[in-house]
Image (spheres, coloured by chain):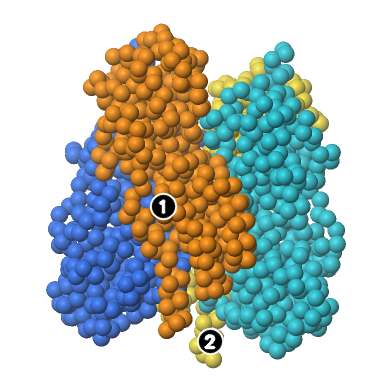
Chain colours: A cyan, B orange, C yellow, D blue
Amino acid sequence: MDKIAVITSGGDAPGMNACIRAIVNTAWQDDVEVVGFRHGFRGIAQDLAQPLHPDDMRLVSQRGGTFLKSSRYPEFREVSSAQQAARVLDSHGISALIVIGGDGSFRGAAHLQAHWQGQVIGIPGTIDNDIAGTDTTIGFSTAVDTAMDAIDKVRETAEAMARVFLIEVMGRHAGFIGLHAAIAGAAEAMLLPELEPQPKLADMADNILRAREAFPDSSYIVVVAENLWPGGVHELGNNLSKATGVTCHPCPLGHIQRGGRPNAQDRILAMQLGAAAVSAILEGKRTIMIGLEQEHVVEVPLHLTFARDKPLDQRLVQLQLGLQGVNLASKSATKTA
Amino acid sequence: MDKIAVITSGGDAPGMNACIRAIVNTAWQDDVEVVGFRHGFRGIAQDLAQPLHPDDMRLVSQRGGTFLKSSRYPEFREVSSAQQAARVLDSHGISALIVIGGDGSFRGAAHLQAHWQGQVIGIPGTIDNDIAGTDTTIGFSTAVDTAMDAIDKVRETAEAMARVFLIEVMGRHAGFIGLHAAIAGAAEAMLLPELEPQPKLADMADNILRAREAFPDSSYIVVVAENLWPGGVHELGNNLSKATGVTCHPCPLGHIQRGGRPNAQDRILAMQLGAAAVSAILEGKRTIMIGLEQEHVVEVPLHLTFARDKPLDQRLVQLQLGLQGVNLASKSATKTA
Amino acid sequence: MDKIAVITSGGDAPGMNACIRAIVNTAWQDDVEVVGFRHGFRGIAQDLAQPLHPDDMRLVSQRGGTFLKSSRYPEFREVSSAQQAARVLDSHGISALIVIGGDGSFRGAAHLQAHWQGQVIGIPGTIDNDIAGTDTTIGFSTAVDTAMDAIDKVRETAEAMARVFLIEVMGRHAGFIGLHAAIAGAAEAMLLPELEPQPKLADMADNILRAREAFPDSSYIVVVAENLWPGGVHELGNNLSKATGVTCHPCPLGHIQRGGRPNAQDRILAMQLGAAAVSAILEGKRTIMIGLEQEHVVEVPLHLTFARDKPLDQRLVQLQLGLQGVNLASKSATKTA
Amino acid sequence: MDKIAVITSGGDAPGMNACIRAIVNTAWQDDVEVVGFRHGFRGIAQDLAQPLHPDDMRLVSQRGGTFLKSSRYPEFREVSSAQQAARVLDSHGISALIVIGGDGSFRGAAHLQAHWQGQVIGIPGTIDNDIAGTDTTIGFSTAVDTAMDAIDKVRETAEAMARVFLIEVMGRHAGFIGLHAAIAGAAEAMLLPELEPQPKLADMADNILRAREAFPDSSYIVVVAENLWPGGVHELGNNLSKATGVTCHPCPLGHIQRGGRPNAQDRILAMQLGAAAVSAILEGKRTIMIGLEQEHVVEVPLHLTFARDKPLDQRLVQLQLGLQGVNLASKSATKTA
């Protein structure tokens, strides 16, 4: 064992740099060299190698994004791509590869493993938190903080103008950011792909109207997961405005949710997982993801991380459903009293 | 002189609360009472009065939005509305009204003045900075910081993925936020209503392509003022993506730009103008706006503030045009050398 | 069951307001009234009651501190104080009391329970995280973020001037903030009460000198827990400066660590615990603390929370000890190679 | 004209990096090369040259500190040091030097000019804002925002616990940060070197006691400039605590005030001054500072920048003195009414 490689793959996430630092520094303690490939799997295929040394890791963990750069690389589904990557890795004398990324990246990692004899290890790095086998992923906590900060800002103008806002948050096909941001932002309603049953437009409109009647001077904020409503939050705004007669302003948060300095939780998580990945390699492990469950580092077979959906914590769903409706109910109760 | 009134009107802006604090505290020093009307001109017409006391001002200046609430109230263009407002003000024994708002609010203020014998004083409070007669407006500096923070965040993910982003900033029909955010965010290009001539799509596409060739690994950020491109930044993104073959991601910042705690500059400006407005009232002034020009508090006839457009500082425009193009040129120069 | 009370006690912590909101809103759903007493146990003894209604909870969870106010109240150790508090609670018809605070507050809560027949429930609210029976406490995560932000700021000037800084963080007699901030801030060294053996001055000085030799152009940051070094971080700075000949700048972070808007993690934790406390009351529970262990809400006998020390997570201690020393070692290794 | 040099000198200030970017990019447009020397004047004397290219300037302006590094270098007062620096500059074929720094650095710049035939140009970069001939300096605005943020944080815990805090801010021998932070933080009192007469301890104690009587539930914050009270803010705290019987908590903000990402105002100012400095060099100017007065770029003879003290804006002093005392007065008035 003398040389390992690391890539960041798929959408970047705050904390990826801290993870790379932990990998490099931990490996160095065991006299293992680390090579990075820029731009993820594409960088392996195109041999965009970059030696990584502890001296260069001193000031990276504070920064968002990934200094190793990332990319989406659908071509990697081809067998020839995986074979090409295996050749490149072998040509560098690399015996293990750490892939920091999301579920798409882990599919790529498993694909590579099928065509390479080295050890492939995944570390969950995505703001979406939609990876089974780990309670959280690198970047998720920071993304929730960023979405919450944005909701807090919109809340101020919404209060001043007594307006309804529909805030669209990221999360592709999972409601983790939406759920956590809705709780943290004390949202009046939320629309997430996992809710059963999905709220109906008529009910949402009805809730808005009742809230407007009870609190004519106040804001009303709905957190909406992206890719959920046909036509997006703009169309939802049109529909709700028509149904209620109240202008419902769309406010998609967009790519600011990926950026920003990682918060402490993401930096610490990233360093834990990075150090554990190196240890796992030294122990001869392969084809696993290093995750965190119930505050413990765990090893999960790689294919299990993308073979099943990760459910929302139903206790948090119920918490928010309980808290978001109470103001209106209480006011009505008072009024009828 | 014993009682004055204050409203916040139009779009809310960070710093409005600090301005109200300065008005109330300054008036109190001269034994003048202050009454607020909630929701701007509508609140006067509907007599939504709220006494304001220094004790209640202790913790407001740190907060964004406006605790007095605001509104847009087109009905106030009617003569009958102004007359109704005059009656309400008189019924409270109010001898002067301070209107914190933008150019639309100042038109309303002038309209009221035509039908009321009291003193009407304007204070420029809008993130757009599009008010003639003052170098800056309450909320502008904070909004620029907010837009810059967002650009910094998008920059990180743009760098990681080597992407082109089109960031839409507020400013209705003026490019102040866009210009300042473009400089502060070190944008590669900007699209503002005041640019002469307007950049053509073909030229913008050409610049993007040349930048992609010179820096294939890097980000490219265009700051775009809202209401400028037909179909907005999404349509611009479609057009540029087609013209370049490179995906140009739209990223409208939206209403987060109005919110947030005011920065120090906006708080200090707000308190300066608020205190000066009370002094002007005590000196018998009327139908003026209190502004800040070249670091000095100035008094400007109210109608001049909305009768003419406020130009961008051409020195800053030239600064950004010079800085934004240099990297590409330098690289090309190097390559041809 | 129709009326419960809540206090915040001891040092305030970001998230306390969100916790109160969850208590009030959850109780309201079950037709239970909530009364707050201002200033903690002192407020009960002095009957500083304040009814709490969901309508007033709409905008509190975003804010740091505690709107119910807190205090330290050593007089509450007296039996007569507890009896007085019991009388006040009874006079309001209160059947349960929720105490949000730290270990000192929980001793007070247990003391009250001994003299009152109502249900006493504790919720861990302290930035110090030094409460046994819960993995984390309300305010801890935000305090770590705040300390990390400060370290990041000091890092920039330390890098520019190639300086050594000793950053003192809060934590009374526990190293939780220090450990987490050291990892997140990528500190070069840390000094915590729990380290065994404690680093010696000579070794610390030696490490600094070796780092200065290896990286003469770079910063060196030591995170130091308060109340640890005799004379504090100023005296430590004097000692280290003498021992090394290099000026070691003291930088106590102080009370900024208590303030600030709570981050998402603390808001969500606070709402979880607040809602669970109300549920526990409805189930007839008493003399327990509601905590969070391994992501699950748990109930812990109150006396166990302060009868034993809570240890640092040794895996995190080892992580930081491994990461902080590696740069220097690697450089030396390179030099001798 | 084909090569110029730039250094950052003295205490680092947020925005220095943006200034370097503007210098490099502006020079490049005119085919002028730029060389940086690391660590200020020491770096010239020791020939720590580093070529600067626009390609490397893409991502620096967002960052605090100075990537060129700085230092304090008292040895530069020697004639031999200046002669040595002149030799190094000549050996590189450098015809002009831009010094970004404070008044000490400008003395050094003037000293060098006396022994070198090239053009020396100063740009004011210091958080202290204590340079005559310019309304503001690079880094001042960000430092005020940082101090204000810290005051806001301390305000929350001070409100929760109803405490008195003495917050010490930077500024060496000038009260600019203190004055602006006191206004922006809505401080109840301030202690600055320029106040005439200086508040007496007995009066300060009296104000605190009257405030505690009027507002027993509230915070009281005094902003204190460093280097003003003998023994610093800790000794002042002791004195005031004894005089009042109320614990007055010292809270020195320390070096966090130098760090942090520059705000928009500092980035824009830095780029304006950097570009103007290059223009001045091309026009043959020498021995001047480029400053900003009343929103216009100005050129000031270098020796005038440190030959006289820069006064505080008395209008802002009066504003704060008026606002800070009013609450107490109002409450007393109410009580006696």
Three-letter code, disc 2: Thr
What residue is at 70 percent from the left and 89 percent from the top?
A: A91
- The residue beneath circle 2 is C334
Viewer can see residue D328: no
What residue is at 77 percent from the left and 33 percent from the top?
A: A201
For disc 1, the neighbor class at 10 Å (few under 14, some 14 to 19, many from 20) is few
Question: In the image as oriented, which residue stretches furthest toward the bottom?
Answer: C337
Please tell me which residue lies in front, D283 or C98.
D283
Q: In this view, does D253 lie above or below A55?
A: above
Q: In this view, does A252 lie to the left or right of B106?
A: right
- The residue beneath circle 1 is B195
Q: Where is residue A85 in the image (x, y as percent from the top left)?
A: 74, 81
The tag on residue B70 is none
Q: Position of residue C101 (x, y in %)?
A: 61, 39
For disc 2, the neighbor class at 10 Å (few under 14, some 14 to 19, many from 20) is few
The Cα–Cα distance between marks 1 and 2, rounded to whole angstroms, is: 55 Å
What residue is at 32 percent from the left and 15 percent from the top?
A: B118
